[in-house]
Every structure is written in structure tokens, then in C-alpha cells.
């Protein structure tokens, strides 16, 4: 089968969507399918994988690319695919849907993001009513152009209900490379020696407003006395980093917090192998890959109740879920950090639970949907 994944941006831009597509493509190619990725980007960039077609675009400061249209080569290839899988509803999604209109090429779309929550973060000056109207019209128009809509979790249905949209879709959870994540070696992690004798609390992901890293850091800094011999590590980068570093400096807590910067996907298993607890407070995720990766690797999670996260973490079994309350979050984190036997218990339960997150299960479900559309 000739399958195309279309994304607004791809490597080297780091995002959950990029990661999903990379994993899907890798599994599908291993099963003998011909898979392409089409995106805006620098055509001279080498992603170190085959069949990635970049059309020229303008690079934004965060590494994201935007463009006016795909190259002739990209358009020609797209028109000869068996299935085209779209991943963004505002730029490349509608553009490619219009391009392929009437050509009998099945279009699949995965709704990766709670767009309503992203609007709240990036356009807080817009009224809720205005945001809802803009989103409702844009998504309704786009949904009409595709043949199958996939939701990674039930949480997306909350967004649709909030927007008064009635959409028929299929729920196919995201997946991760379980064996690879469990193959990490803490001794290979660059922080292994600096953190010897200390417990490591890991935050992994982009340091941007919607990830809510400030909440995690504030909860930790305001209760430092509850975290002896413990270090909070931020493995990621982004616009929030400067603010977070300033918060640490104000508390004179540099020895308790490490900013490791952006790490490669190859380094993730080693960081997870060293981590005692994984933390997140993001409220905008649909089915967060970083949380799944932590659980697949056997790392207990402390997280804020949020769409998608609730469908991954089993409260009281593989981690703790809290309200958006700093005291409660810090209390649960301190409980897990201070009790080695509880961490071990959660670790074993998490390894069993993590078996359900295999990316092969996800890709098999995707293939079934592709085949139904081609019948």
C-alpha cells in the first residue's frame, strides 16, 4: 500500500505529531508498505529517512515551518497515493484536501490536539464565544472534507461537545516503542554521575505555556523541604525556559533543579531509566506520548487530572492524579519520592499496564481503517 502522512512541519521540528508519524512510518515500512511524509521545511535538510518530501517554507523562531503550497513533485506524488493521512486541520489539512478533491484518494485525519485549549493559551484576549465560533466553523468545514476521523482518546469528544459539533469518528489510541523504551541504561545518561545518591523527578517535553511547567516547578520549589536528596530535571527547551530559570534563581535552588535542554529521542530511554518519578501538569494533551513513554518504561507518574492523561495513568496503581492544586500535587510527589517500596510497587504495576501501549497495536488499527476506505 502507498501511504502518505501530511504534516505542517516535520523533522527537525520536535512535536508529538512528528513523533507519531515517525513511529507509524517505521512500523508500516517494516511491514512492507511504501510510506511518504509531506511537509513544509528546508528541502536541503536530511531527516535520515527515506521518502520525506519537504516543500519550501518560512521557518518561524521555534523551528516550525509555514508555506503557501507544496512543490510540483509533492503534488504529483500525493495524487498517486492509496491513502493520505492528514494531521493538521488548519494549514496542510484543508490545502491537501482541496488538492485531492475528486481524485478518489481516501483521506484520513487524526485529531491530535485539544484545539480549544490551545486557543485559550495563545489567544487569551479573545472571548470564549469568539473562540468557539472560529473553531466550530473551521473544524466543521474541514471535517466534511475527509473520509475518516480518528481520535487518539475520548477526551477529544469533550472538545467537540464544547463546540457543539457532532462528528462520527474512530478512537485509536497512540502507541510507543515499548521494548526500546525499556532498553534504556541509566549509566549512559549524562546526568548519571551528577545525580548519584539523589532521586530524579523528570519533566520531559517542550517548555511552552500549554505544558504548564511553571506549575510543576512552583509546587516543587515551594515544598523543597519535602524533597530531600531529590532533583527536578527539565529535559526539553522552549520559550518558558527563561522564566523557569528565573524562578529557580529567586529561590536560590540551582542545586535542586537541572535544565538539561532538548534531548534527542535516542536519549529518552536512558533518561527514563534514571528517573524515579515522571511529572506533568499539561491540560491540553489528547493522548500525551511522553506520559505513555514513562509508563511503558515502568516509571510512576504524578500528573494533574487532564483529558487524555486520565486514560493513561491508573490513579493509585501506576501513579497519582491530582487536581490543579499545588499543595496536593506536591504532597503526592513527596509521597512517591519518599517511599521506595511504593515506587517499586508502582513500577511493577506500570510495566504490566505499559504493555497496552505498543505502537504496533495502533498501526494495525490504522491499517484496518485504510483498508475499509479502499474497499
Image (cartoon, rainbow, N blue to C red):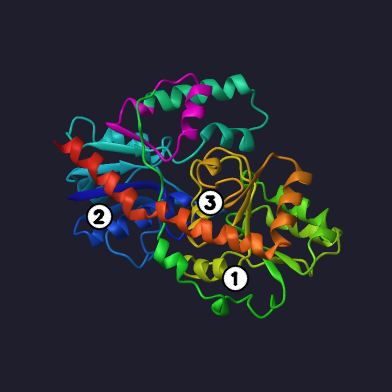
Location of residue 176 with respect to 49 vertically, above or below: above
At mark 3, the secondary structure is loop
Residue 22 in sight in this render? yes
Residues 45 and 188: in front is 188
**Quarter of the image holding residue 42?**
bottom left
Q: Using the image, determine if residue 238 lies above or below residue 119.
A: below
SS at mark 2 in the image: strand
Q: Which residue: 61% across, 40% down?
A: 283
Q: Earlier in the sequence, mark 2 or mark 1?
A: 2
Q: Is residue 318 above or below residue 285?
A: below
Label 1 packing within 10 angstroms: few (<14), some (14-19), many (20+): many
Q: Is residue 156 magenta?
A: yes
Q: Position of residue 186 (x, y in %)?
A: 56, 75
State which mark lies toward you, 2 or 1: 1
291 relative position to 337: left or right = left
Report, in whole angstroms, how far the alpha carbon at label 3 lies from the one at label 1: 34 Å
From the viewer's side, name the closer residue of 68 and 15. 15
Q: Left of 326 or right of it: where is 186?
A: left
User: What residue sits 78% from the left and 62% below the top?
Assistant: 227
Residue 35 shows which numbered tag? 2
- Residue 49's x, y, as percent? 32, 65
The answer to whether residue 327 is left or right of residue 162 is right
Check if mark 3's residue and mark 1's residue have beta carbons within 8 Å: no
- Residue range in magenta is 142-166
Magenta stretch: includes residue 32: no
Mark 3 lies on residue = 60
Give the labeled residue for mark 1: 274
Among numbered discs 3 and 1, the one appearing first in the sequence = 3
User: What whole-number distance in Å separates the C-alpha atoms at marks 2 and 1?
Assistant: 35 Å
Query: In the drawing, what numbered circle is on residue 14?
Result: none
Q: Residue at x 72, y 47 (%)?
A: 329
Between residues 293 and 88, which one lies in front from this camera angle?
293
Amino acid at each position: 500500500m502507498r501511504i502518505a502522512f501530511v504534516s505542517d512541519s516535520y523533522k527537525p521540528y520536535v512535536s508529538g505529531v512528528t513523533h507519531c508519524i515517525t513511529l507509524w512510518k517505521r512500523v508500516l515500512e517494516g511491514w512492507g508498505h511504501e510510506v511518504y511524509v509531506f511537509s513544509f521545511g528546508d528541502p536541503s535538510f536530511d531527516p535520515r529517512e527515506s521518502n520525506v518530501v519537504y516543500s519550501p517554507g518560512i521557518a518561524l523562531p521555534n523551528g516550525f515551518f509555514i508555506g503557501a503550497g507544496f512543490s510540483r513533485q509533492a503534488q504529483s506524488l500525493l495524487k498517486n497515493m492509496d491513502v493520505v493521512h492528514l494531521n493538521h486541520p488548519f494549514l496542510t489539512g484543508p490545502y491537501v484536501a482541496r488538492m485531492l478533491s475528486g481524485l478518489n484518494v481516501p483521506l484520513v485525519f487524526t485529531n491530535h490536539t485539544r484545539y480549544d485549549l490551545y486557543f485559550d493559551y495563545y489567544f487569551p484576549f479573545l472571548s470564549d464565544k469568539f473562540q468557539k465560533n472560529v473553531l466550530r466553523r473551521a473544524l466543521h468545514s474541514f471535517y466534511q472534507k475527509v473520509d475518516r476521523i480518528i481520535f487518539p482518546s475520548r477526551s477529544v469528544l469533550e472538545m467537540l461537545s464544547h463546540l457543539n459539533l457532532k462528528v462520527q469518528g474512530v478512537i485509536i489510541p497512540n502507541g510507543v516503542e515499548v521494548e526500546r523504551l525499556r532498553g534504556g541504561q541509566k549509566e549512559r545518561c549524562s546526568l548519571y554521575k551528577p545525580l548519584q545518591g539523589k532521586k530524579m523527578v523528570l519533566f520531559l517535553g517542550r517548555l511552552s505555556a500549554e505544558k504548564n511547567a511553571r506549575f510543576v516547578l512552583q509546587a516543587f520549589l515551594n515544598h523543597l523541604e519535602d524533597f530531600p536528596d531529590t532533583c527536578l530535571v527539565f529535559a526539553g527547551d522552549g520559550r518558558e525556559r527563561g522564566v523557569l530559570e528565573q524562578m529557580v534563581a529567586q529561590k536560590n535552588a540551582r542545586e535542586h533543579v537541572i535544565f538539561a535542554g532538548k534531548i534527542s529521542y535516542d536519549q529518552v530511554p536512558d533518561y527514563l531509566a534514571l528517573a524515579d518519578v515522571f511529572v506533568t501538569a499539561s491540560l491540553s494533551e489528547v493522548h500525551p506520548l511522553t506520559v505513555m513513554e514513562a509508563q511503558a518504561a515502568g516509571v510512576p507518574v504524578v500528573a494533574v487530572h487532564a483529558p487524555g492523561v486520565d486514560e493513561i495513568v491508573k490513579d493509585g496503581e501506576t501513579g497519582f492524579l491530582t487536581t490543579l492544586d499545588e499543595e496536593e500535587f506536591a504532597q503526592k510527589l513527596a509521597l512517591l519520592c519518599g517511599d521506595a517500596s511504593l515506587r517499586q510497587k508502582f513500577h511493577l504495576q506500570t510495566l504490566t499496564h505499559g504493555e497496552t501501549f505498543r505502537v504496533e497495536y495502533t498501526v494495525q488499527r490504522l491499517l484496518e481503517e485504510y483498508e475499509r476506505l479502499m474497499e
